[in-house]
Image (spheres, rainbow, N blue to C red):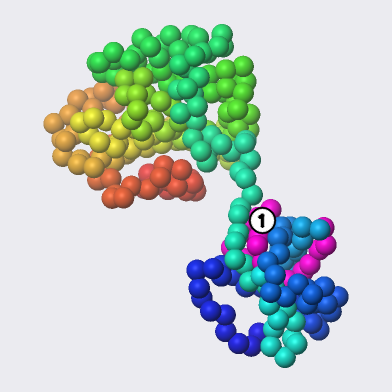
Amino acid sequence: MTGSIPLTPAVLASLRIPAATAPSAVALLKALVGQTLEATLESTGPEGLHLRLADGKELVAEGNLPFPAGSALALKALPLPSGAGIRLQVVRATPPPASPLLHPLTQGEAAPLLARLQAPGAALEPLAALFRALMPAGAADQPESWSGWLKEALRALSDPAASPAEATFHRLQAREGTGWFELPLPWAVGAEPLRLWIEADRDAGPEEGKEPVHRVFLSVPFSALGDVRLGLEQRAAGLRARLWLQDPTKLAALRPALEAALATLGRPVDLQILPLPDPAPDLRALAGGTPLSALG
């Protein structure tokens, strides 16, 4: 393409339809030069980008767009120099709405769960009662509070009767040997939720002659420690634990007690306490490693 395209905020990208390869499309667009067209990005293939105009007509354009299929585009048609074809300037792009199935991952599920716990139906009443019981100050200091809340909240988010908008997502994840959960904290309502990623190596197991490997990643806010990340990897040979804190020195005095508690599990434990990067990456980015490479 000859000539240059001004890089103004109004131009997001530019496509072209050469007259030599698409004369009918160019003839159609010549009548619309200077106008703004509405189109949908249908797909991208080796021959180009497939666009569908508002009236149903289809076009194939050359170029690249950083937008997913299904995006709604506003295109300004302009002539290429010397009658070489048509240039389509992208002046607006709106990605397709995310599938409701992915809302637990993309939008979070702690806030919707908290809202349902305020006026629970029959399926959520037992969890709501537990939530209310754990709200008083000091409840978070009891290990059984953590384990009880985690167990019951994860079960509720996977139950179609209690969480119809989230359960399908979690059941599909379970088939892949993974899990992503967000839970409100009863003892810190309004704080960042507890975020949890769980995975198992799909190719590891007795039938393949490999040891099973399970990993858990956790992020949770503490009033005294700030944002804390915990990574655990369990193998037949032992447990690897990684703790990331904004200030690791705050746990120095507690480290002997923490190691003693881990020793009661009856298997070797490799514990490291590390500084949390600033800014700390989203837990979903860490969990996306292959596999949880952030454990080191």
Please, what secondary structure does the residue beneath circle 1 have?
strand
Residue under label 1, please give it: 72
Q: Residue at x 62, y 35 (%)?
A: 101
Q: Residue at x 81, y 63 (%)?
A: 58
Q: Nearer the viewer, residue 264 or 226?
A: 226
Bounds of the magenta span?
A: 56-75
Residue furthest to the left in view is: 253
Is residue 189 magenta-colored? no
How dense is the environment of label 1, judged by Cα within 10 Å: few (below 14), some, or many (20 and up)? many
Q: Position of residue 270 (x, y in %)?
A: 30, 37
Residue furthest to the right in view is: 24
Q: Position of residue 265 (x, y in %)?
A: 33, 22
Quadrant of the rendered image containing residue 54: bottom right
Side of 178 relative to 38 (left or right): left
Q: Is residue 174 above or below residue 264?
A: below
Look at the image and tell me whether residue 172 can be seen. Answer: yes
Q: At label 1, which amino acid type do we have?
A: Ala
Q: Nearer the viewer, residue 145 or 200?
A: 145
Q: Residue at x 19, y 25 (%)?
A: 257
Number of numbered discs: 1
Q: Is residue 192 above or below residue 189?
A: below
Q: Residue at x 20, y 31 (%)?
A: 224
